[in-house]
Amino acid sequence: MSQATVTITQTNFQTEVLGAKTPVLVDFWATWCAPCRAIAPTLDELAEKYRGKFTVAKVNVDEVPELAAQFGVLNIPTLIFFKAGEEVDRVVGSQPKSQLEAKIQQLTG
């Protein structure tokens, strides 16, 4: 995991996601999920590229099932985009880097 990526817990969700000054992509994932592992390097790369303008945060659904339930996450990976503390977009499943980057640029542009 990249140093630019934030690990989310029940304790820091409010501050790191809802109270963030920049848009946030929250990746709901699990260690046993092959598509989650496949998309992880792309998310790390985007976290580094947009550091300071955009945050990539990760929620392990096995460790923080309350957040997955709160946001109705039924399949993983689920990527939820937040801006100003509000959910603005959501994608389920592995996505091409170009598609994720386009969404990030829309939110940061």
Image: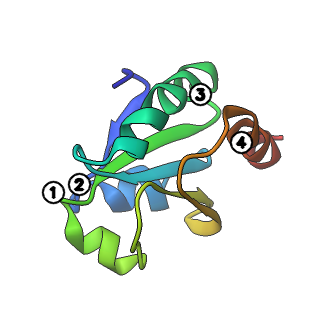
User: Comparing marks 3 and 2, which lies closer to the viewer?
Assistant: 3
Cα separation, mark 4 vs mark 3, equals 9 Å
Q: Earlier in the sequence, mark 2 or mark 1?
A: 2
- Mark 4 and mark 1 in contact (Cβ < 8 Å)? no
- Mark 1 and mark 2 in contact (Cβ < 8 Å)? yes
Q: Which residue is drawn at 36% across and 21% down?
A: 3
Q: Residue at x 55, y 65 (%)?
A: 85
Residue 91 in the figure: left or right of residue 75: right
- Mark 2 and mark 3 in contact (Cβ < 8 Å)? no
In the picture, the quarter occupied by the N terminus is top left
Between residue 17 and residue 57, name the one nearer to us.
57
Q: Is mark 2 on a helix, strand or loop?
A: loop
| Classed neighbour count for the residue bearing mark 2: other residues with Cα under 10 Å, few (<14), some (14–19), many (≥20) | some
- Mark 3 and mark 4 in contact (Cβ < 8 Å)? yes
Residue 104 place in picture, x, y as percent: 71, 42
Mark 3 residue type = Leu
Task: Kindly identify which numbered label has been placed on residue 104.
Answer: 4
Q: Which of marks 3 and 2 is nearer the N terminus?
A: 2
| Classed neighbour count for the residue bearing mark 3: other residues with Cα under 10 Å, few (<14), some (14–19), many (≥20) | many
Q: What element carries label 3?
A: helix
Residue 27 higher or lower than 76, as above or below = above
Cα separation, mark 2 vs mark 1, equals 8 Å
Q: What element carries label 1?
A: loop
Q: Which of marks 4 and 2 is nearer the N terminus?
A: 2
Cα separation, mark 1 vs mark 3, equals 24 Å
Residue annotated with mark 3:
46
Residue annotated with mark 2:
9
Residue annotated with mark 1:
63
